[in-house]
């Protein structure tokens, strides 16, 4: 690839995924990722602090969720606010053209303990960011915490269904269905 091509972070993520699948995460270096993307090691570190981060989008998902929470209708209840944010995430990030990459990415994460640990930490950060965004809307702290935790669960369920090889439904539809299931489960006594 020529160095002048746009979307260096995307190119680096695609190169890393290819190499992680081919050689394994542990056997792939930052230099190899950068070279495979047609970039330099310094360009890699301009976008990512280490090779673990290259498959985590640099906070894009968190930023989109926080933005979705902020832009939800003022009359929406806490879980509806989270649902609106998940819908927005589906429209802007979990799009049909990213599905195959996401499937492959999840397979690499599942095969690598270090990446699964990073994914768990990212989910904790995502939940904390949702709590803060809900707090900024004036939602009481305990309610914000519960809504964010349930939102993270809904996100995880919808994501797992979205990347399933037989899935063709969009992320937003799956997230709404998962939220309905979570609400129904909460109504059980």
Image: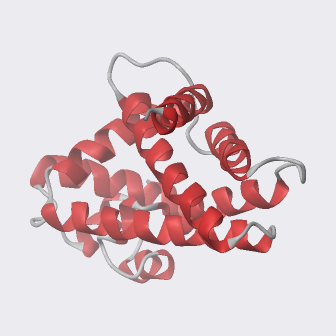
Q: Please name the residue shown 60% across and 69% down the image.
A: 142
Quadrant the C terminus occupies: top left
Pick whichever, 11 or 144, lies toward us: 144
Residue 164 percent across, percent down from the top left: 34, 26
Pick whichever, 1 or 74, lies toward us: 74
Residue 141 percent across, percent down from the top left: 65, 73
Q: Please name the residue shown 82% across and 47% down the image.
A: 76
Pick whichever, 157 or 33, lies toward us: 157
Q: Please name the residue shown 24% across and 63% down the image.
A: 115
**Residue 23 appears left or right of 171:** left
Image: 10 above or below 183: below
**Residue 80 appears left or right of 48:** right
Res 120 → quadrant: bottom left
Pick whichever, 80 or 5, lies toward us: 80
Q: Please name the residue shown 37% across and 36% down the image.
A: 160
Image: 116 above or below 17: below
Res 171 → quadrant: top right
Residue 159 percent across, percent down from the top left: 44, 39
- State whether residue 86 appears in this view: yes
């Amino acid at each position: 690839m020529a160095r002048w091509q746009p979307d260096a972070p995307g190119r680096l993520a695609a190169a890393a995924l290819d190499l992680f699948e081919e050689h394994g995460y542990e056997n792939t270096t930052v230099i190899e990722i950068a070279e495979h993307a047609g970039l330099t090691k310094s360009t890699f570190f301009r976008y990512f602090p280490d090779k673990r981060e290259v498959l985590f989008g640099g906070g894009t998902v968190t930023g989109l969720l926080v933005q979705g929470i902020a832009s939800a209708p003022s009359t929406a209840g806490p879980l509806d606010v989270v649902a609106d944010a998940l819908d927005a995430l589906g429209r802007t990030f979990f799009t049909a053209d990213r599905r195959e990459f996401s499937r492959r990415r999840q397979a690499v994460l599942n095969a690598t303990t270090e990446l699964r640990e990073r994914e768990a930490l990212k989910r904790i950060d995502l939940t904390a960011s949702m709590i803060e965004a809900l707090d900024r809307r004036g939602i009481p702290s305990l309610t914000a915490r519960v809504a964010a935790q349930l939102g993270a669960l809904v996100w995880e369920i919808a994501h797992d269904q979205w990347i399933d090889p037989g899935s063709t439904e969009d992320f937003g539809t799956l997230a709404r269905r998962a939220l309905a299931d979570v609400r129904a489960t909460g109504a059980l006594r």
